[in-house]
């Protein structure tokens, strides 16, 4: 019995999934050894609960370029609150301000 591609993706660890997403969405390559776990977001939406790890990516190859029509901006940590973001991301702002 085969495993579908989507099922196979869910079998990856968070670091492997992040590496894949960084390549697919920003066109950059990195490695597990370059990722440092910082904290996580935990947020209840109406129809599901999100538990999302937050990593610092210390090194990568390539220039981040949005591959799927996203907007990308390099901003100071103190300015993160000026940007629209999902509710689950809001508690991460003070953590990033302190860390960066």
Image (cartoon, rainbow, N blue to C red):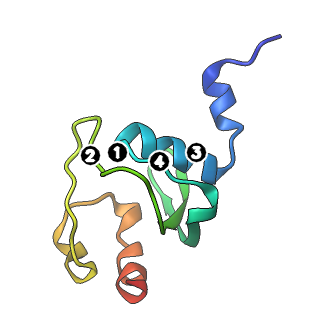
What residue is disc 3 on?
17
Disc with the residue nearer the chain's start (1 vs 2) = 1
From the image, which quarter does the C terminus lie in?
bottom left
* Alpha carbon separation for disc pair 3 and 4: 12 Å
Whether tag 1 and tag 2 are in contact, CB under 8 A, the answer is: yes
Residue plotted at (49% across, 62% down):
43
Instruction: Where is residue 2? Give x, y as percent.
Output: 77, 13
Earlier residue among tags 3 and 4 = 3
Number of residues whose C-alpha sits closer than 10 Å to that of mark 2, classed few (under 14), some (14–19) or many (20 or more): some
Q: Which mark is residue 80?
A: none
Q: CA distance from mark 4 to mark 2?
A: 12 Å
Q: Nearer the viewer, mark 3 or mark 2?
A: 2
From this viewpoint, which residue is outermost toward the left?
82
Label 4 secondary element: loop
Residue 23 lies in quadrant: top left
Left/right placement of residue 1 relative to residue 28 reads right
Residue at point 47% right, 48% down?
Answer: 29
Q: Earlier in the sequence, mark 3 or mark 2?
A: 3
- Which residue is farthest bottom? 98
Using the numbered discs, state the Cα–Cα distance from disc 3 to disc 1 in whole angstroms: 14 Å
User: How far apart in space, not on screen, are marks 4 and 1 (Cα)?
Assistant: 9 Å
CB atoms of marks 3 and 2 within 8 Å? no
User: To which residue does mark 4 refer?
Assistant: 29
* Residue named by callout 2: 65
């Amino acid at each position: 019995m085969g495993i579908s591609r989507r099922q196979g993706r869910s079998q990856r660890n968070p670091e492997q999934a992040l590496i894949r997403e960084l390549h697919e969405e920003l066109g950059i390559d990195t490695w597990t050894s370059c990722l440092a776990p910082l904290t996580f977001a935990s947020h209840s939406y109406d129809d599901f609960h999100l538990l999302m790890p937050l990593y610092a990516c210390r090194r990568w190859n390539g220039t981040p370029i949005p591959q799927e029509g996203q907007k990308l901006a390099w901003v100071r940590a103190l300015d993160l609150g000026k940007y629209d973001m999902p509710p689950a991301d809001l508690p991460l702002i003070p953590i990033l301000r302190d860390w960066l």
